[in-house]
Image (cartoon, grey):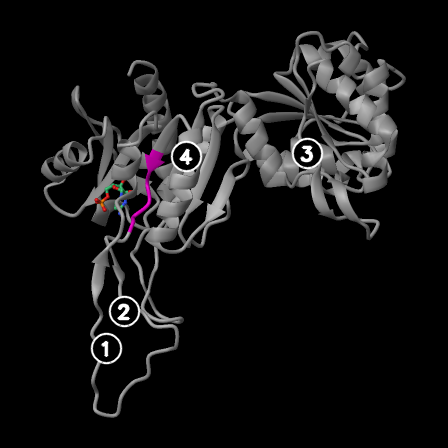
Amino acid sequence: MSQLLSEKRIVLGLTGGIACYKSAELCRRLQDQGASIQVVMTDAACAFITPTTMQALSGKHVYSETLDPTMANSMAHINLSREADAILIAPCSADFIAKLAHGLADDLLSTLCLARGACPLIIAPAMNREMWANPATQRNIQRLIDDGISVWGPAAGEQACGEIGSGRMLEVPDLVEEMISFFSPKLLQGIKILMTAGPTEEAIDPVRVITNRSSGKTGYAIATAARRAGAKVTLISGPTALPRPYGVDFISVRSAREMYEAVMTVAAAHDIFISVAAVADWYIKNSTTSKIKKTADGGFPALEFAPNPDIIASVATMENGPWPIGFAAETDNLYEYAEAKRQRKKLPLVVGNLAQDVMDRDSTRFVLFADSGVSEMQPASKPAAAAALVAEIARRYRSR
Ligand code: C5P
């Protein structure tokens, strides 16, 4: 697995809240991505999880005293932020938010935040929903945003106190994803990208469908990479077994005609359209609303097919439509078929790959077809290939 936070030094600050139990896992998952973690805890945090746990996981002494004699100059509040690429406070309590908003410095963590200089500060709030909704907290949060502090979350859902609402700390994978995005070059900042991904399903009857082997992995990886690059992504997906990519507007569809309707409804509001979905070419004209029964004579239903709308060809002919990028998965003659497809559908860019090498696999190899010619990208895992493709798309989009 490629590590997306290698060489990043992160101060992980813990304040008092039950979500502290997730910070142990957060520390490990940030390390998985290559980050080195320096933990700082408030006294209240130490009531929820021990510094010993965090020290064992981070492999470093955990700081919590303002005047720490283990540091040669006894200035942990200065040294720790000078050595860091970012400070993440997770969980960040309502009390600590109030402190940050007012510039209080009565313990090590708040003092080092005040003394951080240019080091970016990020908070992941975690508290009861009423505490989060309280006008005082909202006022303080707005102040932090105005001061350039990043606020990740909170999420909504069930809370430790039994209430349901907004105030949960973001889940660990979502915080890691936010951290990867935070350090990713913003090659597509503010660009609105519409994508399709996955297979489509064409109904035979209410229980049977015709579909294909697309897993959605390539499209989902591109959606994630585009979001990390700063794009606002809308993903219209056929049925897949994958978790929804974090931070992406997600529209779920089944058939090609549903996908077409969903795309055409929102396409005009986007800058780029990337059509990764393996869209069925035909739907079944004589599908039934009741399950087709087996007959005693061993007969079988005569399915009648009709063509589905070509989604990307329709987008490519829109006046002022998004910049369209097609995909071509072929089993043979990739170069010939992909280029023919590009010309027939009038696309500036088609991304080709060999179906048997990529469908439902974890790696891929893209070949790009454009007016300027053909170029081959390196074989790579789907996330790595997606990141390289997004950089290539950004470059070509800007010089189109
Ligand atoms: O299915 P085909 O190989 O022609 O797909 C090539 C490109 O066209 C892909 O980008 C695919 O998402 C798109 N396509 C589409 N609507 C269809 C069929 C394919 O947008 N009905």
**Which quadrant of the figure contains the C terminus?**
top left
- Give the residue drawn at x 66%, y 8%: 118
Q: Please give the name of the residue rendered at 64% of the width and 37% of the height, measured from the top-left corner.
A: 26
Disc nearer the start of the sequence (3/2):
3
- Residue 279 pos. (x, y %): 29, 49
Reply yes or no: does residue 276 show up in magenta. yes
In the image shown, does 73 or 151 lie closer to the viewer?
151
- Of labels 1 and 2, earlier in sequence is 2
The residue identified by callout 4 is 194
Name the side, left or right, on which 135 lies relative to 229.
right
Distance between the alpha carbons at the discs numbered 3 and 2: 48 Å
Residue 279 badge: none
Q: Amino acid at mark 3?
A: Gly
Could you say where residue 32 lies in the image, as x and y percent from the top left? Answer: 54, 35
Q: Secondary structure at mark 3?
A: loop
Distance Cα–Cα, label 4 vs label 1: 38 Å
* Residue annotated with mark 3: 153
Q: Which residue is mark 1?
A: 301
Q: Nearer the viewer, mark 3 or mark 2?
A: 2
Give the SS element for disc 2. loop
Q: Which stretch is magenta?
A: 274-279
- Of tags 4 and 3, the one toward the viewer is 4
Residue at mark 2:
286
Q: Amino acid at mark 2?
A: Asn
Q: CA distance from mark 4 to mark 3?
A: 24 Å
Which secondary structure lies at badge 1?
Answer: loop
Which one is nearer the viewer's eye here, 61 or 316?
316
Which is closer to the viewer, label 1 or label 2?
2
